[in-house]
Amino acid sequence: MAAEYDSMTIPSGSTVSISNHEGEYIAGGSLLEDYMISINSDFEQLIDSGGSDAFTVLGGALKTISPGNLGFSGQFKQMGFVVWKGTQPIKLQFSLEFYYTYNAAIEVVAPIRNLCKLPLPGEGVFGNLIPPGPSVLEAISGTRASNVPPSGEAPAPAEIDQEATKKSADSYVNIRVGNMLFMGCVVTGVEPTFSKNVDEGNSPIYGRVVITAQTMYTATKESLRGW
């Protein structure tokens, strides 16, 4: 029934499923627009390009008095040679939208609320904050831990396991966008927008949310195997 529900409402290439690393579905929706992936490395010059100013001034003067035939500086093109300094995690940004068909509290408010939990800390017994995202131990063991990709089939909104959603906010998630997989991610930002129009239960009948996420680890060539 869940698969039938999805197939009627969301084209397969526009579906987004977010699960915890055990494969339990926690949130998802339909893409509002094209999504963006950022992959960046930092490079720096191997040699300091600060040559001798006096040497450069002398070369410029010689160029002037020799109608451009002679001249030199303390700079060489080899000084611009750059070497790799580091690579950032893969960053992902996409927008989801949610529509009312039978119950806006279940179909619109609940999934957006679940998404908003992901970048937020929890509260401990004594009011201390429980940080979102993976612990150091999870990060160290993450490459060997069980890590199940999200299914392409999302359950109906009323069937989503709220406990799985709660656990995911204190760990890392896996994201499927269409057929592309992004494993081991943390959600760093969520920006929801709700319609001013409500249903009979006073819940907004439409919502959209911009989600920013990144991988836990530095991006590598092997990171793209799920694409």
Image (tube, rainbow, N blue to C red):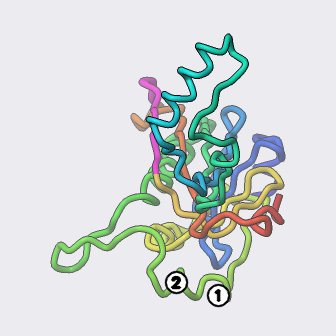
Secondary structure of residue under mark 1: loop
The prevailing secondary structure element of the residues shown in magenta is: strand
Secondary structure of residue under mark 2: helix
Q: Earlier in the sequence, mark 1 or mark 2?
A: 2
Determine the residue positioned at 77% across, 49% down. 6
In the image, what residue type sits under mark 1? Ala
Residue at the disc numbered 2: 138
Q: Residues within 10 Å of mark 1 (few under 14, many from 20)?
A: few
163 falls in the magenta region: no
- State how far apart marks 1 and 2 are (Cα): 8 Å
Q: Is residue 114 above or below residue 49?
A: below
Determine the residue positioned at 37% across, 59% down. 120
Report the span colored magenta.
Answer: 189-198
Determine the residue positioned at 51% across, 67% down. 165
Q: Which mark is residue 145?
A: 1
| Quarter of the picture holding the C terminus | bottom right
In the image, what residue type sits under mark 2? Glu
